[in-house]
Amino acid sequence: MPVKNLLFDLGGVIIDLHIQKTREAFEELGLTDAGNWFVAHNQAALLSSYETGTIDTDTFIRNVSLSSGLSISEKQFRDAWNAMLGKVRWARVEMLRELREKYRVYALSNINALHAQACHHILQRDHDLYSFHELFDRVFYSHEIHARKPDPESWQAVIASTGILPEETLFFDDNPANILAAEKLGFQVHLVDLEITDLVEQIRL
């Protein structure tokens, strides 16, 4: 079926991610083995709660600090937490603008409030854009829709709000689990395994 809508992940697709930088930043602040700490059961559940908006930023920072034993300022925490966020390349901005001339273009991202705020700052700093909302017809953040990929509720929130049909929608993500989940819901899918502008050019959208 012809594609009428495009649905993009953000982290690792539209904005560069360098997760190791956040791990290194927290280790410099005294968190031992940060790479494993953030994926441990209790910490993963804490992050999931934050990314789905069931706890606010102050609660998240306080709980991470308490459970990790860190005694750092809020600014130190924010700087370390946001260290993973890289650039939104200008070519991607141009790509999205061109695609919106032919398609309805949406974003669906597992993202927390701190990272969303930091991403908007990066767009303002580098491209004089207020937020991702200027680049997409609609943006769906997990902390606002209270669901995160690969849970089906994430895509169902997009469908309910926009009225798009999955079979007419091409979904881009760099996480194979998310691709599989979207495919099961009837979306056309494409795993992002190279620069998104090159990928879009290859599939000739």
Image: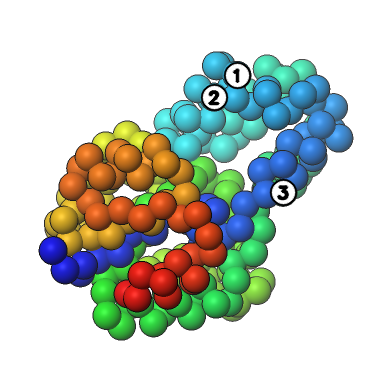
Can you identify the residue that label 3 sits on? 83
Q: Are marks 3 and 2 in contact (CB under 8 Å)?
A: no
Q: What amino acid is at disc 3?
A: Ala
Whichever of callouts 3 and 2 sits on the residue coming sooner in the sequence is 2
Q: How is the image coloured?
A: rainbow
Q: Secondary structure at mark 2?
A: helix
Whichever of callouts 3 and 1 sits on the residue coming sooner in the sequence is 1
Q: x, y (%) of residue 75?
A: 76, 44
Can you identify the residue that label 2 sits on? 44
Q: Secondary structure at mark 1?
A: loop
Mark 3 is surrounded, within 10 Å at the Cα level, by few (under 14), some (14 to 19) or many (20 or more) other residues, namely many
Q: Nearer the viewer, residue 93 or 128?
A: 93
- 52 relative to 156 in the view: left or right: right
Q: x, y (%) of residue 184?
A: 22, 40
Q: Are marks 1 and 2 in contact (CB under 8 Å)?
A: yes
Q: What amino acid is at disc 2?
A: Ala
Q: Is residue 118 above or below residue 61?
A: below
Q: What amino acid is at disc 1?
A: Ala
Q: Give me the residue at 60% from left, 71% from top.
A: 89
Q: Give me the residue at 21% from left, 67% from top.
A: 3
Q: Is residue 54 above or below residue 143?
A: above
Can see residue 154? no
Can you identify the residue that label 1 sits on? 40
Q: Secondary structure at mark 3?
A: helix
